[in-house]
Every structure is written in structure tokens, then in C-alpha cells.
Amino acid sequence: MSEFQGQVAVVTGAAGNLGSALCHKLAQAGARIALLDHDAEAMARLVGQLPQGTDAASFGVDLLDPASVHGTVSAVQERFEHIHILANIAGGFAMGPTLDATDDATWDLMLDLNARSVFHMARAVMPLMRNAGYGRIVNVAARAALQGQGNMGPYCAAKAAVVSLTESLAAETKPLDINVNCILPGTVDTPQNRAAMPDNDHDTWVPPDALADVMLFLTSQAARCISGAAVPVYGRS
């Protein structure tokens, strides 16, 4: 995929399962990568595991702090000059009680991790993409964004907000060569999910590598006419 040669990709949650899978695919495709995460040690390990010659740098960031986000985006711009791709992967999940028993802290946490983080990053990066007249943004929503589930109200609401933010950004950038899409993963096959659900059929889950393939496609020229889409990636479940 030589079209990614020289392009600068910013990946939030880079040290996680999906983040690291996407970073590897971007590196193999020739992209330059800014890894954003709060885990400096994990990012350092990941940079060392990327293909030799990859132009990559890691940046610590608090995605819930606007000043930290803007400062980090400025540091990325200073290091790489441009930002062509933004992959908003950082997020979090927590089961809860019924909605009437949910406290404000749980509500705020789910909205912050999954929706506010996307809002902060898009707000900081979008002016750079507007000035350049080019950009690709891929957000991570969830299957649960389309249908509320019991004991998951705050998480479902947060991921539904990601879909709405994606659609709004796509509408605002329609005249430009800026595409904004999101993916809707089903259950992702991670060590954490396997430990939490040991009796489930893991073969039906979605490997992070497969999700990364879809995200890479959405940032490619092949997807140049796709914007505002919420792409289901459910595996076989």
C-alpha cells in the first residue's frame, strides 16, 4: 500500500490491543505514526516492535484534558509537520447495574472515555486537516451503539454519541477531501475479554487484526467516497 508512504497517522489508545494492531499495519503500509497513550512503557515497547525503519514517536496524553490534547497535537505537528490520519481508538467499557442504580461517576466515566476523548481529539486535529484540505478520521463506536443493552446504559449511550459525532463531522466536512467514519465492533477477541468470558465461543469474536484491516481501508483512497458511515464488524457472532 504505497499510498500511505509519508502519511502521518495519529493513533490514540496506541498501546492497546487494537491500537497496536493498527500501528503495525500502518507501519507496514509506509505511514509515519504518532502513538498516543497514557502508558509510556507500553508505547516504548510497541515502537521497538514496529518494522525497522518506521518513523514513529510516542506521546503521553490525557484525552480528557483539553490543554493536554492541544499540547500533544501541537507536539505531533512539530515532530511530523502534518496529520493526515486520526484513529480514535482509546475508550473503555464497564458493565453496570440497572440504569436506575447507576451513579453519576459511572455515567461520566463511560461518556468521558468513549465520547469526550473523541470530541477533544477531533476538535484539536480538525483545523489542521481543514487547512491542508485533506484528512481521514476513523472512530471506534460499538455494536452496542445501535441497540441499548441491559446493565450497559452508559456505555451504549457513549458509543451512540460516537456515531452521532462521526455523522456530524462528516456533514461538516462534506465539501472537503476529509472523510470521517466509524466502525462498530462486536465482541473483540482480546486476552481481557477471554478472561472475562471464558465459556464463550471465542472463534466467533472479532480479532483486533481484522478490525485494523477495516480501519486501514477506511483511511485509504479506496474509501475516498465513504464518509459518515458506521461500519459493522461483528465477526460471526
Image (cartoon, rainbow, N blue to C red):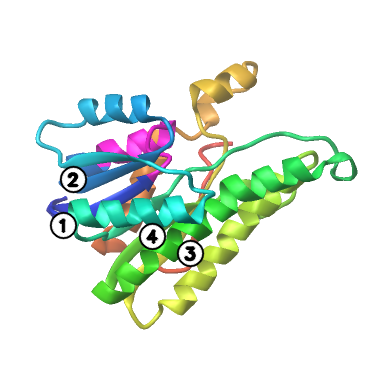
The residue at the point 21 percent across, 40 percent down is 56
- Count residues near mark 2 (Cα–Cα under 10 Å), then give few for <14, some for 14-19, many for 20+: some
Q: Amino acid at mark 3?
A: Ala
Q: Position of residue 232 (x, y in %)?
A: 52, 51
Image quadrant holding the C terminus, namely top right
Residue 206 shows up from this direction: yes
**In the rendered structure, which disc, 2 or 1, sits on the residue that comes first in sequence?**
1
State if disc 1 and disc 2 touch (CB < 8 Å): yes
Q: Amino acid at mark 1?
A: Glu
Residue wearing tag 3: 229
**How far, Cα to Cα, is label 4 from label 3?**
11 Å
Residue wearing tag 4: 137
Q: Position of residue 99 (x, y in %)?
A: 85, 45
Q: Amino acid at mark 2?
A: Ala
Nearer the observer, 127 or 94? 127
Residue wearing tag 1: 3
Indicate left or right for 118 with 14 as reference: right
The residue at the point 32 percent across, 74 percent down is 130
- Count residues near mark 3 (Cα–Cα under 10 Å), then give few for <14, some for 14-19, many for 20+: some
- Majority secondary structure in the magenta region: helix
**How far, Cα to Cα, is label 3 from label 2?**
23 Å
**How far, Cα to Cα, is label 2 from label 1?**
8 Å
**In the rendered structure, which disc, 3 or 1, sits on the residue that comes first in sequence?**
1
On the image, which quarter does residue 60 sit in?
top left
**In the rendered structure, which disc, 2 or 4, sits on the residue that comes first in sequence?**
2
> Element at badge 4?
strand
* Residue stretch rendered in magenta on the structure: 12-25
Residue wearing tag 2: 29
Q: Which mark is residue 113?
A: none
Indicate left or right for 132 with 152 as reference: left
**How far, Cα to Cα, is label 4 from label 1?**
16 Å
